[in-house]
Amino acid sequence: MERAHPSAPGPLQGFRIVEFAGIGPAPFAGMLLADLGADVVMIDRLADARAGYPRMALNRGKRSIALDLKSEAGRALAWEMLASADALIEGFRPGVMERLGFGPDEVAKRHRKLVYGRMTGWGQSGPLAQSAGHDINYVALTGALSLAARPGASPSIPPTFIGDMGGGAMFLVTGVLAALLEAQRSGRGQVVDAAIVDGTALLGALIHSMRGIGAWVDRPERNFFSHTSPFYDVFECADGKHVTLGAIEPQFYAQLLQRLGLDDVDPAAQYDSRAWPELKARVAALIRTREREHWCGLLLGTDVCFAPVLDLDEAAAHEHNRARGVFVEVDGKRQPAPAPRFSRTPSRAPQAGPLVGEHTEAVLMELGHAKEDIAASRAQGACA
């Protein structure tokens, strides 16, 4: 297949990834690879094409071909696509790809250099491998959710950020990129088993390291990360909006006290947790006397480690995020911009995700099929 894709800059230009379409972190990983310039071609379900699914921002920069993988003709077309691919990614439960006939062993027989990226919640093996689960469950099992607990309240985290995308998709991308580099040297592909529980546990490496040397305290009343200190928490303002303080280091804490006018508080006693409840109540009462905008004017951009809690619309409008282009609009809808930034090979500009099956004909023609052959495959129900 000719390795061409319109508007494909980025450091991964020239690489082709075949994504077996699914939901959650695997499509997000595919989006990141497409942002970086890879030609990501999704194999979507024929039924989804006929249902007329809408464009998805999570599929920006990708192309879509709709195949019936339960038909012999549809599977043959998928094998043709894999023959020219550098990597495959999929996010099904363990065993699904094997039942479809595209398990790692079968793929390796035909394409020994292909990198095979697998995304699951619990992993390809282990007692829970075949169980259903979601982000909140994976984060809970690794101990990460417990770190978000406030005294007297149930722990809570933003949905999908920590497990699905952080512990899942980001590690799938890391693994696929590392395996692609190794395959260029060895000429051999390998399976990348990216489990959300594995990645989420690894995201806690700093906490485990601190705990190992006694710098992390399991008792929340003595651990500033547990929202019990006066210098690391979310505080409510007079208008009901919120701000955050994170003055962990002594020099930042001293500046915070000075700017809040708390001249009678000894900055050297910052980590005397016995004084925290009273001082925190005092700081909270002070913050509640003025609106969020006042505290932004006083503290934002200083070294007290301060930021307002913004909703999604406010975040997109904030001057820092606008200056960096953190958010973009595509067809009138907001999306986060690609990250990270590259000095020489910039990422692909975000664009609308494809309709399911939108590129079936174009991709099959790149494989060498004539329009008459494609029409015949459609008539057989192999593709849309």
Image: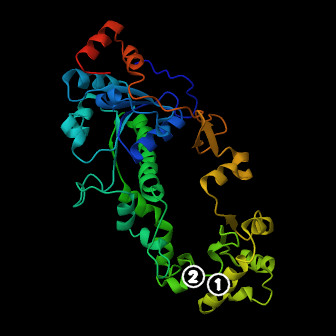
The residue nearer to you, when weighing 332 against 108, is 332
Instruction: Give the numbered dot on residue 119.
Output: none
Please say which color scheme the image uses. Answer: rainbow
Find the distance from the CA under tag 1 to the CA under tag 2.
8 Å
Residue, disc 2: 228
Instruction: Give the numbered dot on residue 280.
Output: 1
Work out which residue is located at the far bottom of the displayed protein and give it: 274
In the image, what residue occupies the spot 50% across and 34% down? 60
Work out which residue is located at the far front of the displayed protein and give it: 239
Q: Is residue 21 visible?
A: yes
In the image, what residue occupies the spot 24% across and 20% down? 381
Identify the image quadrant of residue 276. bottom right
Left or right: residue 228 versus residue 306 is left
Q: Is residue 164 above or below residue 221?
A: above
Whichever of callouts 1 and 2 sits on the residue coming sooner in the sequence is: 2
The amino acid type, in three-letter code, at marker 1 is Lys
- Crowding near pointer 2: few (<14 within 10 Å), some, many (20+)? some
The amino acid type, in three-letter code, at marker 2 is Thr
**Residue 242 on image: x %, y %:** 65, 68
Q: Is residue 204 above or below residue 254?
A: above
SS category of the residue bearing label 2: loop
Q: Does the residue at mark 1 contact the one at mark 2 (Cβ under 8 Å)?
A: yes
